[in-house]
C-alpha cells in the first residue's frame, strides 16, 4: 500500500513491472545532474545514453518508487537488499546483463544490508521525496532483520554526502576505485539499523517535473521477506549511490 504524506502529493509504493522505463528515465536524468563534473563526460554520456535493456533483478532486491500527482508519475526510486561484494560491482543496467556480482558473507548471512541506489528527478531534489525513499529503505532492511546497512557514494559528491549524514549515515573509511568510470573514487557509509516510529517517514512536496516513457516488462518482485536472515540470495549489480 502507498504511504501518503499530509499536505503532499508524494507517496511511496513498491515498484511494479510497468515502472521500469520511468525508473530508468529518473536514473539517467539524476546521473546527468548529479555527476556532471564528477565523472568524465565521455563515461557519463555512455552511462546515460543509448538503448536500454531491462536488467535481470533477483527476488532478494527490493525496489520502491516515489510517485507524484493524481496520475502517480514516478519521480524517484530506491533499491536495497543484501550487501554486495565491492570487487564485483557492475555500474550500469547493461553491465549486469552477463555475470552478476556476489554478496558479501555478511550480506548472505542477513547481517548487513545495503542501499544500492536512491535517485530522484532533479526537479524533485530538496522536496522531501529523497528522505522518504531513504526512510522506506532503512525500515525495510531493519524489518528484514539486518543489523547494519551500508551504501556507497562518490567521494567528491558533497551534496549526496550531506544528505546521507543528515540521515544518520557515517563514512567508515573504506574506499573503492571505479575503473570503468574513469577511476573516480566512491566511499562507503554505514549506520546501525532500528525500526523508525510508525508514520515516521518524511514528507514530500509537489511540483516535480514529469518523466515519461514506454512501459516494458521488468522482473521486479518486491515481496516482504525476500531478503532476510538465512535467506538464499541471488546476485545482482548496481550503479553508485547518489
Image (cartoon, helix red, strand yellow):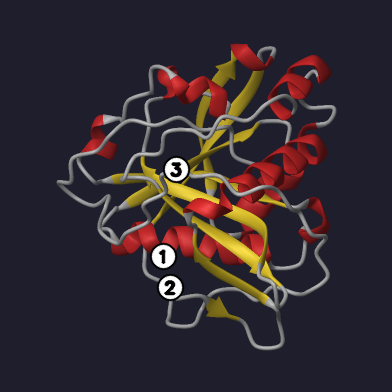
Quarter of the image for residue 1 reads: bottom left
Judge whether residue 89 can be spotted in this image.
no
Dot 3: few (<14), some (14–19), or many (≥20) neighbours within 10 Å?
A: many
Q: Nearer the viewer, mark 1 or mark 2?
A: 1
Q: What element carries label 2?
A: loop
Residue sitting nearer the eye, 22 or 182: 22
At 75% from the left edge and 46% from the top edge, which residue is drawn? 159
At 80% from the left edge and 51% from the top edge, which residue is drawn? 122
Q: What element carries label 3?
A: strand
Q: Residue lying farthest left?
A: 230
Residue highlighted by disc 1:
139
Residue highlighted by disc 2:
196
Q: Earlier in the sequence, mark 3 or mark 1?
A: 1
Q: Verify CB contact (< 8 Å) between mark 3 and mark 1.
A: no
Q: Is residue 142 left or right of residue 136?
A: left
Distance, label 1 to label 2, CA atoms, is 6 Å
Residue highlighted by disc 3:
150
Residue sitting nearer the eye, 165 or 88: 88
Q: Earlier in the sequence, mark 2 or mark 3?
A: 3
Q: In this view, does 26 lie to the left or right of 79?
A: right
Q: What element carries label 1?
A: helix
Distance, label 2 to label 3, CA atoms, is 17 Å
Q: Which of marks 3 and 1 is in front?
A: 1
Position of the C terminus by quadrant? top right
> From what the image shows, is residue 111 above or below residue 179?
below
Judge whether residue 57 can be spotted in this image.
yes
> From what the image shows, is residue 41 above or below residue 207?
above
Q: Which of marks 1 and 2 is nearer the N terminus?
A: 1
Q: Verify CB contact (< 8 Å) between mark 1 and mark 2.
A: yes
Amino acid at each position: 500500500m502507498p504511504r501518503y504524506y499530509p499536505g503532499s502529493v508524494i507517496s511511496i509504493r513498491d515498484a511494479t513491472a510497468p515502472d521500469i522505463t520511468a525508473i530508468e528515465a529518473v536514473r539517467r536524468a539524476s546521473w546527468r545532474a548529479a555527476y556532471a563534473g564528477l565523472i568524465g563526460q565521455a563515461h557519463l554520456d555512455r552511462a546515460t545514453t543509448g538503448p536500454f535493456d531491462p536488467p535481470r533483478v533477483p527476488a532478494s532486491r527490493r525496489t520502491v518508487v516515489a510517485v507524484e500527482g493524481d496520475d502517480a508519475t514516478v519521480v524517484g526510486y530506491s533499491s536495497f537488499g543484501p550487501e554486495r561484494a565491492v570487487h564485483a560491482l557492475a555500474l550500469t543496467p547493461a553491465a549486469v546483463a552477463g555475470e552478476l556480482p556476489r554478496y558479501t558473507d555478511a550480506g548472505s548471512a542477513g547481517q548487513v544490508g545495503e542501499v544500492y541506489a536512491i535517485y530522484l528527478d532533479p526537479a524533485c531534489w530538496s522536496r522531501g521525496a529523497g528522505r522518504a525513499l531513504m526512510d522506506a529503505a532503512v525500515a525495510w532492511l531493519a524489518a528484514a532483520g539486518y543489523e547494519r546497512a551500508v551504501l556507497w557514494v562518490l567521494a567528491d559528491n558533497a551534496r549526496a554526502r550531506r544528505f546521507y549524514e543528515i540521515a544518520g549515515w557515517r563514512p567508515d573509511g573504506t574506499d573503492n576505485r571505479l575503473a570503468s568510470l574513469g577511476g573516480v573514487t566512491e566511499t562507503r557509509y554505514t549506520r546501525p539499523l532500528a525500526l523508525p516510529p510508525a508514520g515516521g517517514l518524511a514528507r514530500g512536496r509537489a511540483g516535480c517535473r514529469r518523466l515519461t516513457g514506454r512501459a516494458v516488462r521488468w522482473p521486479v518482485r518486491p515481496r516482504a521477506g525476500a531478503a532476510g536472515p538465512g535467506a538464499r540470495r541471488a546476485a545482482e549489480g548496481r550503479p553508485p549511490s547518489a
